[in-house]
Image: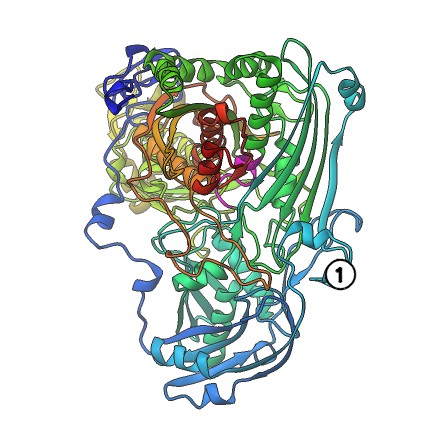
Amino acid sequence: MTTTDLPDHSVPHEAADPDRPVHGGHEHSPDEPRFDGRRGRWVGASVPRREDPRLLTGRGRFVDDIALPGMLHAGFVRATVAHAHLTALDLSATRAVPGVVAAFDAADLALGDIVAILDRPAEEFTPTAMPVLARSKVRFVGEPLALVVASDPYAVEDGIEAAQVSYDVLDAVTSAEGALAAGAAVVHEEAPDNVLLDVSMFDTPGVDEAFADADVTVEVTTRSGRQNALPLETRGAVAAWDARDDQLLVQTCTQVPHQVRTVLARSLGIPERTVRVTVPDMGGGFGQKCVVGREEIAVAAAARRLDRPVKWIEDRREALTAGFLAREQTYRTRAAFDADGHITALDVDVVCDMGAYSCYPFTAGIEPLMASAEMPSVYRVPAYRVRGRAITSTKAPTAPYRGVSRPQYVMAIERVMERAARALDLDPVEVRRRNVITEFPYTGINGVTYDPGTYRESLDLAEATIREEGWYEARERGRQDGGRHLGIGFCCFSERTGYGSEAFAKRKMTVVPGFDISEIRMDTTGSVVVTSGTMNHGQSHETTFAQIVADRLGLDPEHVKLRQGDTERISYGWGTFASRSVTIGGSAVALASERLGELLCRIAAHLLETRPENVALDGDGGVVQLDDPSRRLPFADIADVAHLRAHLLPKDVDPTLTATASFDVPGDGTFSNATHAVVVEADPGTGQVRILRYVCVEDCGVVVHPQVVEGQCRGGIAQGIAGALFEEVTYDAQGEPSAASFIDYLVPTATEIPDVSIAHLETPCAFTANGAKGAGEGGTIGAPAAVLNAVNDALRHTGVELDTTPIHPGTVLDALEGTS
């Protein structure tokens, strides 16, 4: 079969046209104004992004763009072995290098350790301290040992090379299996078995009985490789001590500025009021930057000690070898099914290699606890048992990465559905259809209540698109001809978004994220400045939050300015992660805007000498008298009184126009959902996998900005494909990481990432202020399982089934050649 025999999807079937999104069962243009009580002129429209003019013309300001008078540069002496006692660290030659101003080891800076804690008993969780600079022991290649400060980056590198380090080398621990083996080297003395967390969150009645009575039992062991989140901008910080304000100013690219402030103050032993953290433009984070790193603390300490600004920018080698990593997990999953294909029980063992330390504030429990709590995914599971373990090893520590375990546990449960379909001789989509949740709200066996979604509808539409485009026929022709190896794969999943305080508290974290706070201020021109504790690193917050404010107040978005990423200006915030920005931060912004609107109406009624209930926002930047629409006050006139003629205000109204609101998602949060459908071709000559078609049907509630949502989806899918087919950090027996550059770490390019068709379904969330659900991580969650299932479908005739990502071409080639 030639390429011309493949389906032509350049003009998709009308019912599945990805360029004509479906919202609430009705098709419409993304730019069409919509009114449903939650939205107005702006929410739902793909307006031009406010950020683009600045960023596309080079006027953005990132950490590395910052240059302060007298600024010094910093770099780190890093461990060159994975596991050893540190017997000597001599910095005398470093300090003698021309241009080197200072060199500090752990004793010189005397900083407090970073300690992340869960409120769990000792048999479940072992806390471990992460020193800012290693003292007596190193636990991974790249661990920082000393800080070198010099007049320029070249002198820094010379100073680092001059450092003399001696080790008493210990055995490396390079895998979870090795860490758990008898006689394994101990990474932390506090955890002699190398287990940092061991929790059985669920063991509901009936699991064993269900397996005993099952018509079909399937067992799958899935594994995912270690990955780097790979933001375009690496980590960095510029720190300076302001003696006049008695304050340490740290400018850094973090998703969680308030958490950085807290840890900085504690580590340096100074009051939080003396620390200010600000975030300029940020070139991506993906979760890697939502934990507190060691380097920015050391740099800040050096700046305070030297009373001069100090800059550190992570190079790509450091980012690949010593930055926070993620994803290395193993799932041993057993599932029981009846003869009709209904799942009756699930029994899972989750093992996550978390590297050398717990990340702050989430701890080493972040991945196994996420997987344990949400493993049933979108399916009705009557009985459930799970054990989750976090293993420590001599590798760079793990931090959240876009999706946090969901790509892995979704891959496990989706492989179970595929295996069950084969065992029962059923279509794999039909098995999903028989098990997927369809009645809402639904409280699962995991105690989580799922709010309404379109699980069945997204599955049906994704399947219909692939069928109507002729891909099933093309696959069969390829199998009959024997010349092309096509495969079709699906993944049906949900994404819990907007975790509130209640949801995080269930993990028993001592630091419990959740709420967000917003303040909105109107100036004398009628324009507003709104703050949010969330943090923009590519999600278009300046645009989408302005749309929310504009609709609530009846303003043009051009009159709305968003402020984020400044601990001095934003009272408190948890930053951006877990798709919480629009759901939680946007809800706080919406509520603050409504309160300001109420205040404007109250003042206007007083000035118009009418009752408060006889006025309303007119949707055009003013307040109108309802019984006489000819009487109207523009916001600028009201603001002029509030600021400049306060004697005219009602006696019980304070001067100026300011409102504040907080928001916290109740209960278990809200759930976006999607189905991904993928068509792949396996090359019999090289084993390379090429994606021919990628369809995503998603439901993230009310869509604030369709183009931004689709950008989030496509970016997430690209990262998911990367994990499925390309990216992996491996280690040799001595714990040396394989990937020190992009020569070794295989990153997909635009050539490998296909066009993605996206169709929207819309189920408004009942308990966020905007009806929105999160959209940041869904693309990443669904892609690995969908691609893996499609590759297995392409290999069906070989009898080989793959359950590990990334999928290596050699493995595919072996299967096609019959050598596996």
Query: Seen in the image, is 387 located left or right of residue 524?
Result: right
Q: Residue at x 80, y 19 (%)?
A: 209
Which of the two residues, 311 or 789, is positioned nearer the viewer here? 789
- How many marks the image carries: the answer is 1
Location of residue 552 with respect to 181 vertically, above or below? above
User: Could you say where residue 181 lies in the image, as x and y percent from the top left?
Assistant: 74, 53
Which residue is nearer to you in this view: 682 or 14?
A: 682
* Residue drawn at (72%, 62%) of the image: 186
Q: Position of residue 798 (x, y in %)?
A: 50, 27
Asked if the stretch drawn in magenta spans residue 404, the answer is yes
State the image coordinates of residue 289 (x, y, percent, origin top left).
Answer: 47, 52
Quarter of the image containing the N terminus? top left
- Residue situated in front as seen by the camera: 110 or 42: 110
Q: Residue 205 versus residue 561: which sits nearer the camera?
A: 205
Give me the residue at 60% from left, 52% from top: 361
Say what secondary structure mark 1 lies in: loop
Quadrant for residue 637, please give it.
Answer: top left
> Mark 1: which amino acid?
Glu
Q: Which residue is mark 1?
A: 190
Q: Residues within 10 Å of mark 1 (few under 14, many from 20)?
A: some
Please indicate whether residue 816 sits to the left or right of residue 155 in the image: right
Q: Quadrant of the C terminus?
A: top right
Does the rendering let one see residue 673?
Answer: no
User: Is residue 80 in view?
Assistant: yes
Left or right: where 734 falls relative to 243: right
User: Over which residues does the magenta segment extend?
Assistant: 401-408
Kindly report the secondary structure that dominates the magenta region of the rendered protein: loop
Q: How is the image coloured?
A: rainbow
User: Is residue 390 placed above or below 173 in the rendered structure?
Assistant: above
Return the x and y of residue 106 as percentages of the image width and height: 59, 76
| Identity of the residue furthest to the top in this view | 340
